Image (cartoon, grey):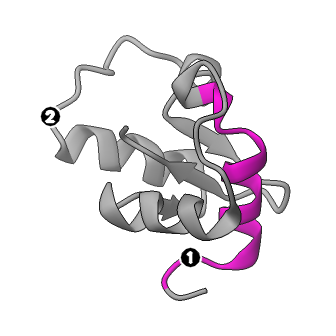
Amino acid sequence: MNQYDKTCVTYFFEHQSQLFGKNILEDIEEAEEFLEDCMAVVCKNLKEVRAFFEEEGADIAEMNNEELKDAAEVFTLPDGRFLVVEG
């Protein structure tokens, strides 16, 4: 796997319904291609997640950290990092 490590891709593949509402990706390779195509971002903490959304112009000023973590686009990885996927 190239840009995204195994943890990111596997977790996204296994939890894709969080973003799509159902499973649409058929395998790990397809999940990795999707992450690359949508230029998903790996953040080491919520501060970086917030900064990413602010740079993108998202109106998240009123969101607390729990609301931010609960956003469909934000995947909390098992190792504590966050994967932001804008589908």
Specify start and end residues of the magenta stretch as a single range: 3-18
Marks 2 and 1 sit apart, C-alpha to C-alpha, by 24 Å
The location of residue 26, given as percent across then percent down, is: 66, 51
Nearer to us in this view, 56 or 40: 40
Nearer to us in this view, 64 or 9: 9
The location of residue 82, given as percent across then percent down, is: 61, 52
Nearer to us in this view, 6 or 84: 6
Going 64% across and 38% down the picture, which residue do you hit? 16
Q: Which mark is residue 57?
A: 2
| Above or below for 23 versus 12 | above
Image side of residue 27 versus residue 33, left or right = right
Quadrant for the C terminus, please. top left
Quadrant for the N terminus, please. bottom right
Disc 2 secondary structure class:
loop
The mark that comes first in sequence, 2 or 1, is 1
Q: Amino acid at mark 1?
A: Tyr
Q: Which mark is residue 4?
A: 1
Q: Quadrant of residue 44?
A: bottom right
| Above or below for 63 versus 87 | above
The location of residue 49, given as percent across then percent down, is: 46, 46
Q: Quadrant of residue 34?
A: bottom left
Q: Main secondary structure of the magenta part?
A: helix
Would you call the spot at circle 2 few (<14 residues within 10 Å), some (14-19), or many (20 or more)? few
